[in-house]
Image: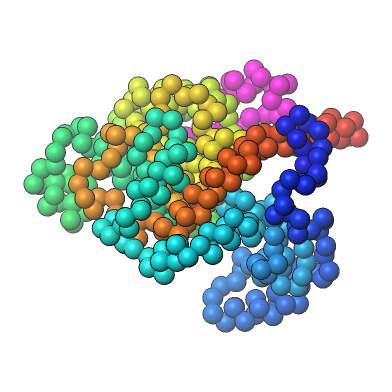
Amino acid sequence: MKLSSSGHVRKYASVNYLKNEPKKPDVKTAIPGPKTLALTEKLGKIQNTGAINFFVNYEKSIGNYIVDVDDNVLLDVFTQISSIPLGYNHPRFHDVMKNSQNLSHFINRPALGIFPSADWPDKLERALLSIAPKGLKHVTTMACGACSNEQAFKLMFTAYQRRKRGEPTEEEKESCVYNKEPGCPDLVILGFDGAFHGRSMGCLNVTHTKWIHKMDYPHMDWPCAAFPKLKYPLEENVEENKQEEARCLEDVRRKIDEYNARGKFVAGLIVEPIQGEGGDNSASADFFCQVQAICKEKGVFFHVDEVQTGGGSTGTIWQHEQWNLPHPPDVVTFSKKMLTGGFYATDELLPREAYRIFNTWMGDPTKVLLLEEMVKVIKDENLLSQVKVTGEYLRSNLNELQVNLDKLW
C-alpha cells in the first residue's frame, strides 16, 4: 500500500515492478543465521569482520526488502548506509545492464581525466547537469563521498590563495614540493561538532563524532564550531531554538576570527544539511542562510556536503534547495544515492591548471549510466512528490504517537 498525492491510500497496481516485492518481513532463523556465521568465520581468515551484520542474497532481494543468505526477509530501512536510491533489483537498472550499447562501458574503464569516451559530455548533461543545484553549472565526478570532499577542500584552498595573491610564484612552486611555506600555506576548513564527512585524513579533520574514526591518526588544528541541538517538538520550543541557533552562529563567527588572528586562515566552511552519523541533527533554513552570510562577510567559501542528503530522499534532489539561499553554495559534494561521487562548483572554484583535481579514474561511467536512468525514473514516476506525501504521513503519525506516549508517562 502507499499514499496518493491526495493523502489517500492506494495499491501499487500501476507500479508493475513491485509485484514480486514481499508483502511483509519473514524471519526464519536467528540473525545472524547459521549460513552467515559460517561465512563470517571464512571471511574472518582473510580480513576483519567485526562490522558485518549478515551476508546478503542480492539475487533474491527486491524493492524495499533485503534477503539474507539464511532466507530471512527484512524491510530495509538502512539501505546500504543510505546509498540505494530505488531499492533492490530495480527493473530499469536491469535494462541498463542488458543494453548491448552499454557493454563497452562495463568492460573498459577509462581514465576519464585524459581519455573520456565520446558520449561522456552528453552523459554528464543528462545525469548530473539536468539536476544540478541552482546556479551551479560545473560538475566533476569522483569515486566516493570522502574523495569528493577532499577534492572540494583543494578547490577552496586554491581559490582562496588565488584570490589572495593571483598566480603562484616560483618560490611557492618549489617550497610546496617539500611541504614548506609559502607553497603550503597554513589554511584551514571550519567544521561542526557532530559532523561526519568521511574517513580519509583530510575529512577526519572536520569529522567530530566517534573516537573509532579518529584515534591514533595525526590531525591538523582545524576549527570546530557548535552545531544546534534543537529541542523538540519544534513548534513548542521556538524561542529556545532561536537562541540555540544564535549561540552556534556566534561560535562560527568567533572561530573564524580566532583562527584568522592566529594566522591559520579559514578558507572554507563545510556543513551537512542533516547530521546523520552525528545523531540525526538538523537546523532551520534561516540558520544555514546566516552561516552563508557569515562566510560571505569573512571571505570564507561555503561548502554543502550532500553526500547523505542528496538524491531525493528529503523531497528535493538537494536538501539545501529548501533553504532558499540568496546565493548558490560555492561547492556541493555528493555520493551515496547519487551512485557516483563528485562535486558541483562555481566558476571561481574551478581549477585553472590541468591535474590539480585529478586521479586515475575520476569517477566511473557505469555508475553515471545508472544515475542517468535513476533521474528518468524519479521524473517518470513523480517520486519527489511521493517522498513529500509519505514523509508527511510518517511525520504526522510519529507526532500523534509522541502525544499518545506522553500521556502514558
Occupied quadrant, residue 116: bottom left
Q: Nearer the viewer, residue 248 or 151?
A: 151
Please state if 301 lies on the left or on the right of 166 as rendered.
right
Q: Nearer the viewer, residue 377 or 34?
A: 377
Q: Residue furthest top?
A: 239
The residue positioned 82% from the left and 37% from the top of the image is 9
Whether residue 182 is in magenta: the answer is no
The quarter holding residue 35 reads bottom right
Question: Whole-percent x and y of residue 393?
Answer: 76, 34
Residue ID at (76%, 29%): 6
In percent of width and height, residue 265 lies at 29, 35
Horizontal and vertical percent for residue 82?
Answer: 60, 51
Residue 331 in which image quadrant: top left
Quadrant of the image for the N terminus?
top right
- Kindly identify the residue that appears in the image at 20 percent across and 32 percent down: 164
Residue 279 seen from this side: yes
Magenta stretch bounds:
219-245
Is residue 33 placed above or below 312 in the rendered structure? below
Q: Is 166 positioned to the left or the right of 143 in the image?
A: left
| Relative side of 204 to 98, left or right | left
Where 173 falls versus 160 (above or below)?
below
Residue at position x 78%, y 31% from top?
A: 7
Residue 373 on image: x %, y %: 53, 50
In this rendering, does residue 265 appear at all?
no
Looking at the image, residue 162 lies above or below residue 367: above
| Along the line of sight, the residue nearer the viewer: 152 or 334 | 334
